[in-house]
Image (tube, grey):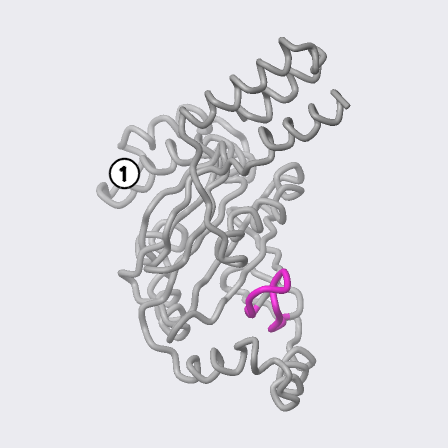
Amino acid sequence: MKKLAYLLLLNLILFKPLYGKVVNIGSDIKLNIPKGYGYIESSWIDHFKIHEPETYQKSLESAKEIGFQKSDSIILIGTKKFVKNYKQFIEDAINYPNIQDTESGKKIINKCGRKRTVKSQNMCIIKFLDYDLVLVAGVGSLKVDGIDELNSYTMDENLADEKLVAEIKEFNKQAETFEVKSRGIKSGPVSFKKIKNSKFAVHLDFNQKMYGLKAKGTLFLFPHKSSFFIFTSTCVTKKNCEKLDKLTYDVLGPYLYNSELKVPNKKDIASKLEKLNDLYKKGLLTNEEFERAKELILF
């Protein structure tokens, strides 16, 4: 009986959800920033200028076709190290003509400048910035033709519409593997489907040559009001690519399931630790169980 009481109480202590920070994209899209991660606010024009300095104007034109203009804000989600180093890198790249003369540029040159090949230099830079596992999210501000009709078609009450189902099947059947040679991207089949049995999106997985390195990622385009909500996630190393799917859906959770996330405060954590300590003092927990439960509360 004591053990049963312990299990019930421990469940109440540990499994009341603890979340990272919740951030709003646009006026009504919420994303979860997991513990250990952070985010940087930027814009499409700055993002394209840094990553595609020679072709960013073409990229901006392409983005406009799906509802995004150059001033629209985006967020980049990554590790705390990424947030610290890349934020400074963005500011230096935007504000100074020669990045190598800036503080962040000098640090990169000092760290990676002696690498023998371009590939090894780029891998060094990615590791220095911790740009190995990064997610990008943004909401378009331009109206896209036909999007209102698409939104109305995909409302739950219309999902039984045989014509709609047939059109979606036909779209998915015709979608073929394609390659965008100018950006070194090759994708798998494009599909329009419900993501995690929740919201419809255009979805594709892709492989990309990024700075001489092989990267992989996922892209979602969710119809949102009169435009799109775009979400991409990219990784380089095998270790981080194994985390890609889990992190993607952890971040998208509040949007996909309309769940309200609460950020834990110090009082809440202190209260949980106090209750846990009482269980330990009463002999209901072994030392190993106590330490493991404490880790779950703190981390």
Residue in the picture at 54% in, 38% down:
17
Name the foreground residue: 20 vs 246: 20
Residue at x-position 40% and y-position 55%: 52
Left or right of residue 170, residue 135 in this image: left
Lateral position of residue 67 relative to residue 233, left or right: left
Q: Main secondary structure of the magenta part?
A: strand
Q: Position of residue 24 (x, y in %)?
A: 37, 52
Q: Tell me the amino acid under the disc marked 1.
A: Asp
- Check residue 255 for magenta coloring: no
Specify the segment rendered in magenta.
190-202
Few, some or many residues within 10 Å of mark 1 (<14, 14–19, 20+) = some
Q: Nearer the viewer, residue 255 or 183?
A: 255
Residue at 60 percent of width and 63 percent of height: 195
Q: Callout 1: helix, strand or loop?
A: helix
Image point (52%, 24%), residue name: 272
As drawn, 288 above or below 157: above
Position in image of residue 290 (x %, y %): 65, 16
Relative depth, front residue between 254 and 217: 254
Q: Mark 1 highlights which residue?
A: 92
Relative to residue 93, is residue 13 depicted above or below? Answer: above
In the rendered image, residue 61, in percent from the top left (x then y), is placed at 35, 71
Q: Quadrant of residue 54?
A: bottom left
Q: Tell me if residue 185 comes above or below residue 273 in the rendering.
A: below
Q: In which quadrant of the rendered image does the C terminus lie?
A: top right
Horizontally, residue 45 falls left or right of residue 109, namely left
